[in-house]
Image: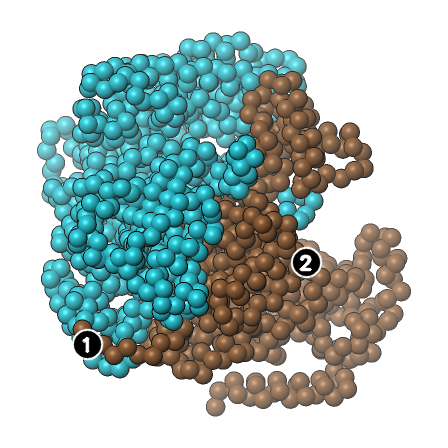
Chain colours: A brown, B cyan
Amino acid sequence: MVLMDAPQSKSRDLDKLLLRSGNLVGPGFFPGTDLRDDIREYVRVLVVGAGGLGCELLKDLALSGFRNLDVIDMDRIEVTNLNRQFLFRLEDVGKPKAEVAAKRVMERVSGVEIKPHFSRIEDKKLDFYNDFNIIALGLDSIEARRYINGVACGFLEYDEDDNPRSETIKPMVDGGTEGFKGHARVIVPGVTPCFECTIWLFPPQVKFPLCTLAETPRNAAHCIEYAHLIKWHEVHGGKSFDPDEQEHMKWVYDEAIKRAELFGIPGVTYSLTQGVVKNIIPAIASTNAIISAACALETLKIVSGCSKTLANYLTYNGGEGLHTKVTEFERDKECLVCGPGILIELDTSITLQKFIDMLEEHPKLLLSNASVKHGKDSLYMQAPPVLEEMHRTNLSKPLYDLMGRVEKDTVHVFGTALKNEEKQSSLTKLRVVFKEVDGVADMDTAILRVNSKRKTPL
Amino acid sequence: MIWSLTMSKTKYDRQLRIWGEVGQAALEEASICLLNCGPTGSEALKNLVLGGVGSITIVDGSKVELGDLGNNFMVDERSVGQSKAKSTCAFLQELNDSVKAKFVEESPDTLIMTSPSFFSQFTLVIATQLVEDSMVKLDRICREADVKVVFVRSYGLVGLVRVSVQEHTIIDSKPDHFLDDLRLNNPWPELNSFVETIDLNVSDHVAHKHIPYVVILVKMADEWTKSHSGNLPSTREEKKEFKDFVKSKMISMDEDNYKEAIEAAFKVFAPRGISSEIQQICNDSCAEPSSSSSDFWVMVAALKEFVSNEGDGEAPLEGSIPDMTSSTEHYINLQKIFLAKAEADFLVMEKRVKNILKRIDRDPSSISKPTIKSFCKNARKLKVCRYRTVEDEFSNPSVTEIQKCLADEDYSGAMGFYVLLRAVDRFTANYNKFPGQFDGGMDEDISRLKTTALSLLADLGCNGSVLPDDLINEMCRFGASELHVVAAFVGGIASQEVIKLVTKQFVPMLGTYIFNGIDHKSQRLLVFLKPEAFQGAIKAINERILSVLDDSGSGRVDMGMHVLNDKRKRVAFEALMWKPVKEGSSQITKTDAEKYIKLLRAIYMLEAHGEEEEITFNQFLDMLDDPDWGFGIMSTVLRLESNDRNRHGSQVCSVCRYPIIGSWFKEVKARFSLCSQCYSEGKVPPPFKQEEDYRFREHGSEAEAMKPKCVCFSVQSHKKPIATRKKQRN
């Protein structure tokens, strides 16, 4: 074999993908060393969560050409993490996950910079999230996903034709696992469905009826939940139950045993008690590795265009044989989080009362008895009477002032709308733009005009 | 010592909840050999070391190069120039000190050539990045030594995973979706006498609403049969009548136990006896025990005896009952009755196992009680997986399968890459490099790869087939690169398969999995189903069809008449004539099985509804229940389909909440989804009324499915108050 040994670089394998042109690639793929170097230099990725998926994501991204990574996680390392969160060792137990994970990857992969944030995601300012080109989610809760989704979609702006402005799109990749199963998805707000568009993907959560727990327990879980949800409060009054407090768990376990003995019910174990009380989801290293790899691959593809992007939801099931499937979900055009909402132009002098009256007349809305919300603040509420009274003084104030004197922002309105000749309660997103505010609106409109001009067929 | 035991229990807690201590013990006894420790191999092994596999032996003869630092997490700058096996081994050892980690500095290809006996010491070999020639040789060695093999390969954005083992038998297959074993259609004396002690007409309301549905249904089925000359409900009308009968016993609308009874009424109508799949396992030639039989087959032989003797057609009782509305006392008593019956069945089985062992000159107590117990508990869920040798796959390719896949939109990418992965090995044998491995001469490599691939296709017997240029170009662009994320993906799959093979739990994959990292339209190819699983069912179906076609019982079918007059019967006739493509072969292709199922669907659908896609729910059920229309074979088709494991993402049935396998029925207006089981039982989700007419659209697995529901995983937070995040468990 006569082979010239080409001078090697650490990016030997990745270069094949980033430096060579291809046929099955994304739009705007410009292969070359510039692309590779730009990814190294300028692209910033945030990894949310440093658990089973997060550890894998950090490693995968560090070995996929990314050098500027941040990781945020509020948890500390526990012994039960060690069967899959491969960046942690026994001696790390008790330390913040984000910090240890960042340190371990930086030790192994030279050149990569990982900034850890030992913090709740809600405690970061919005600007923090806007600094990243893409957000990779390795989370285990629906609430956290909704929060990040809301933040990322909050950056999204639409032009006057209701098309998303590409520079305001903050893409996300999201993964989740349970046992041998998992999913990976790509969320490009305004282009593919956001988390909220497909919130129905989550199975409904069912609770045990309290009367079963109190009166007719039949299995071990009923006894455990009785001890945890009923007996604890009876005995400890105001003291709240902490699942991470071993003594609390032991108490629940002992009580569950007593109750099980009373009724002749078998099967209460300490492990089951923990499982039921903490609602533990079984997790293994391999599934996390698979799902994270898919997420990191999609991150690389979104950033570089080096191949097609997953459209848009991958399910994986390795329990019975092996099944993978891609599903292309559709956006909910009326999604309150990522949808464009209805554009309304207002004078700065319009009062809230006048605005509410306008909603009734607006052909796209026909909304009566509207309550108005701006971010977390209620501007006006129709009911209950106490709250109505509290907000009544707002009605005479200009909406512009109530919204903090910004030229444009989003409000949500809730009321009764006429749909298919039926009165239905309706929640709608509105993009409010105030006319002629400090000339900014003028410039904005000017840009819009250029855009819309380009779209006009010649 | 005690401390370290609890520590390891805590460390492995999240996986012990999946495969239990028995599974963990099997993992800790396993000895795994890895061939080549690039990222694909080291990632596969990483997941196993974390899980606490017994020992690992890494075989790799290469030194760490600078390029390895860019794709392999198990090397670092200090490793450059060192043995890759040694560096990887050291870093893997860091992850878990209870794993025995060794390395052999030797090229796997050489080892395969020179020391075949080396491999017999292992439970399983993970063979990564091997070219075709070495794959075939290793496979042959490991088959002879009874060592399992998982082949894995990453190549640019594509990859391959393939399991190879002569036979893998599973007792604890842990299916997602399985009907409980309540025997409502066939209660045994003790259950009957318990039921007799409970009065359905009890005047106390509280007592009335706490009678478990099992008692209600056994009682009412008994009443029904008494007034129906000993028969259970069988037609659609009778089933509805039976449900109304149950409903009539409700005192008030809030009686959950009666609602559950109506929901579960189908368990009364369910066919008795063992499933066709278990029947096939009993009929397997291995179920005739000899001194060389494995424990599994000895127990199958005992099962077979049990079914035809004490079991009266049924397998041993599983012995557990699902949670149901009930007073504690009734529930506990019921539980005891089920447990007692399971225990009695177990004792019979144990005796039979011992006798068989004696008969084949083995120690009668050589199969442990817990093993027999587990076998009895899972007797309805047994699985047997057999794999062809790699050599057979390569030298006796299924031409039709390859051609069909190459022409199929959903499969062409995966099959194209399957062929190309073989073509690059041929290319390498000819040109001493992989296509596109080096930067120069790309165009030449592309045209050479194309020629190589076409000649490979011709050798496979697929002369007319072509491969898209896009795939060939991409393959050259990949230039044998091993990307970390692709390696982590396919390596991860490999470790899942290893866990399933070693723990003997869950079901390993069949066929060859081709990972397509371009659009994730990955596929399992060349899936051959056990002919036994199909042939028995097909025979039963054909007999039914024949009985319809041959009205006069003459034993002959008047073809002309049916072809002219009866579209449906013509299809039935075609189905009757249909045979697997590779007749006489020991395998049936998945595509053939799919074709058969499609033909059967056509039989149901054709005449009554012409070209219409949608039929009403009631029409469909009437059709199936009608012995002339439906041939009464829906249950067989459902079994065929569940064998086929036709899934819809993770679409969940709105009634039973289980993932939908096989046909998926989506209500057109209300948009709820049903699995075929709940659909055929005429169920609708709780908020909807059973009486109404619903229109269903049926989906296969393919793209026609409009908006498959998938489940997102790990949705529960541990940051939120406990009471708001409960999900049902039992």
Give the residue at mark 2: A120
Q: In front of the other: label 1 or label 2?
A: 1
Query: Which residue occupies 57% across, 33% down?
Result: A272
Is B687 on the left or on the right of B437, as rendered?
A: right
Q: Which label belongs to residue B338?
A: none
User: Where is residue A326, by image quadrant?
Assistant: bottom left
Please, what is the three-letter code of the amino acid marked with disc 2? Arg
Is B269 on the left or on the right of A142, as rendered?
A: left
Is B156 on the left or on the right of A434, as rendered?
A: left
Query: Which residue occupies 34% across, 31% down?
Result: B171
Give how far across and how far down residue B265 sits, in percent. 46, 27
Give how far across and how far down residue A173 sits, in percent. 52, 63
Query: Is residue B34 in sight in this rendering?
Result: yes
Give how far across and how far down residue A258 sits, in percent. 66, 22
Q: Is residue A12 above or below residue B507?
A: below
Which one is nearer the viewer's eye here, B192 or A34? A34
Query: Is residue B419 in sight in this rendering?
Result: no
Give the residue at mark 1: A2
User: Where is residue B395, by image quadrant?
Assistant: bottom left
Q: Residues within 10 Å of mark 2 (few under 14, many from 20)?
A: few
Q: Is residue A207 above or below residue B70?
A: above
